[in-house]
């Protein structure tokens, strides 16, 4: 299965080089697709150095349209069979990819959501943000008869044909 990492980016000049390096160091990704959403801080200039090198493609939005628009562009442009969303701000660690891909590769799932609350070390989260997340996750679980632990998670893995 060909794997694509979609990195939505907006004004990430301080972290974009590092996240690209970390994704490459996993040695399991076939394509890195960075969607710059109209950055004005120098991110776009940095990305020019990566375009079409070492499995990296860069797509530029003319103006800022939000993370959702960048993710939709990434899904449309991705060539992989298995896609993962990676924020550019270094909050999530690409070393987690094998664990996230495994249920799909083993045929147990078509979609996998990561969780910031399942027992591993994580960056601090503000108390009221966590409370709001827990309430939203609880309501989501009721509405969709599911058992998620972190519905606002950044990591989402899915087969491309599930979203096209």
Image: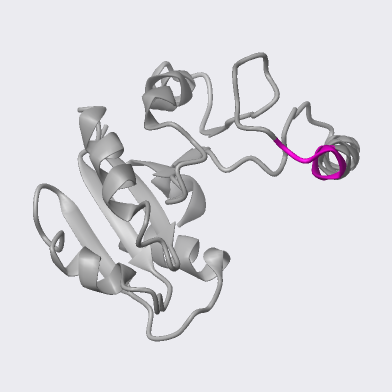
The answer to whether 92 appears left or right of 135 in the picture is left
Residue 112 occupies which quadrant of the picture?
A: top right
Q: Which residues are magenta?
A: 125-130
**Closest to the observer, 50 or 56:** 50
**Count of marks, rendered view:** 0
Q: Is residue 66 magenta?
A: no
Residue 107 occupies which quadrant of the picture?
A: top left
Q: Quadrant of the N terminus?
A: top left
Magenta highlight: main SS: helix
The answer to whether 57 appears left or right of 140 in the picture is left
* 10 lies above or below 90: below
Q: Residue at x 65, y 29 (%)?
A: 116
Rendering coords of residue 141 (x, y %):
84, 35
The answer to whether 21 appears left or right of 124 in the picture is left
Rendering coords of residue 90 (x, y %):
45, 42
**Closest to the observer, 51 or 99:** 51
Residue that extends furthest to the left in the rendered view of this protein? 53
Q: Residue at x 36, y 65 (%)?
A: 35
Q: Quadrant of the C terminus?
A: bottom left
Q: Residue at x 45, y 85 (%)?
A: 63
* 148 lies above or below 90: above
Rendering coords of residue 127 (x, y %):
84, 37
Residue 76 makes an appearance in the image: no
* 5 lies above or below 67: above
Residue 106 makes an appearance in the image: yes
**Closest to the observer, 43 or 64:** 43
The answer to whether 141 appears left or right of 37 in the picture is right
Residue that extends furthest to the bottom in the rendered view of this protein? 62
Q: Residue at x 53, y 38 (%)?
A: 155
Residue 61 occupies which quadrant of the picture?
A: bottom left
Rendering coords of residue 12 (x, y %):
41, 61
């Amino acid at each position: 299965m060909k794997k694509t990492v979609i990195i939505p980016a907006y004004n990430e000049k301080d972290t974009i080089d590092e996240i690209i390096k970390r994704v490459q160091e996993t040695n399991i990704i076939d394509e890195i697709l960075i969607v710059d959403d109209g950055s004005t801080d120098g991110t776009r200039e940095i990305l020019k150095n990566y375009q079409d090198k070492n499995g990296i493609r860069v797509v530029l939005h003319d103006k800022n349209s939000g993370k959702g628009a960048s993710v939709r562009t990434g899904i449309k442009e991705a060539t992989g069979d298995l896609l993962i969303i990676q924020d550019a701000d270094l909050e999530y660690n690409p070393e987690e990819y094998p664990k996230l891909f495994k249920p799909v590769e083993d045929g147990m799932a078509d979609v996998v959501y990561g969780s910031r609350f399942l027992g591993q070390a994580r960056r601090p989260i503000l108390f009221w943000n966590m409370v709001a997340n827990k309430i939203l996750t609880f309501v989501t679980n009721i509405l969709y008869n599911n058992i998620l632990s972190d519905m606002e998670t950044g990591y989402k893995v899915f087969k491309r044909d599930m979203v096209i």
